[in-house]
Amino acid sequence: MEEILNSPEFQAILPYAPYIFLAFVIRLVLLILFCMMADSTLQLIKEENRCLARGQVWFLLLPFFNIYWNFVVVRRLTDSLNNEFYDRKQAVEENPTQKMGFFFAGTFLVYNFPLPMFIGFVLFILNMVALFLYFLKVKEHRELLRNGVEEG
């Protein structure tokens, strides 16, 4: 262990440790906010139209499992929104949130490959941006569901 701590590679990364930690905390907070928002979106969807149980969104917080579960959440959330909008006869794009969701899930998958540090850093930033954009897209459709409930 002492050899690792005294290695030049570790010493070169050490000054950046607080920034790396801060980036992971920001990503975790953004992911928790996304889970809360996706859960509240599923709450607005009738149970018979849901392809994903409300609590299952929180599996995104499990390390390693979330690499796979991102794709499941994207697909099932898209299907749930499709079903609900079709049931309400609201005109929206087909497969809402799917493109941005798969972009988020794909960047997260590739980010977890063992790649050189610079490429990993670029993918981390790209994944954070993709998560934020996916968050906004799901939020937009959640607002459409809310407005549809008020009108109908």
Image (cartoon, rainbow, N blue to C red):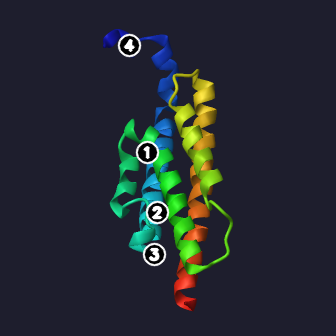
Disc 4 residue type (three-letter): Ile
First in sequence: mark 2 vs mark 4: 4
In percent of width and height, residue 45 lies at 46, 73
The residue that mark 3 highlights is 44
In this rendering, would 124 be left or right of 91?
A: left
Location of residue 82 with respect to 99 vertically, above or below: below
* Amino acid found under the numbered disc labelled 2: Ala
Q: Quadrant of residue 78?
A: bottom right
Hey, what amino acid is under mark 1?
Trp
Please state if 89 lies on the left or on the right of 27 as rendered.
right
**Under tag 2, what secondary structure?**
helix
Question: Which residue in the structure is indicated by mark 2?
Answer: 38
Q: Residue at x 58, y 39 (%)?
A: 106
Furthest-left residue in view? 1
Q: Is residue 97 left or right of residue 68?
A: right
Mark nearer the viewer, 2 or 4: 2
Taking depth in this image into account, of 32 and 40 the one nearest to the observer is 40
Q: Residues within 10 Å of mark 1 (few under 14, many from 20)?
A: some
Where in the figure is residue 48, as x and y percent of width and height?
41, 70
Going from the N terminus, do you reach mark 1 or mark 2 first? 2
Marks 2 and 3, how far apart in space? 10 Å
Mark identifier at residue 4? 4
Task: Estimate the spatial distance between the alpha carbons at disc 1 and disc 2, rounded to whole Å.
Answer: 14 Å
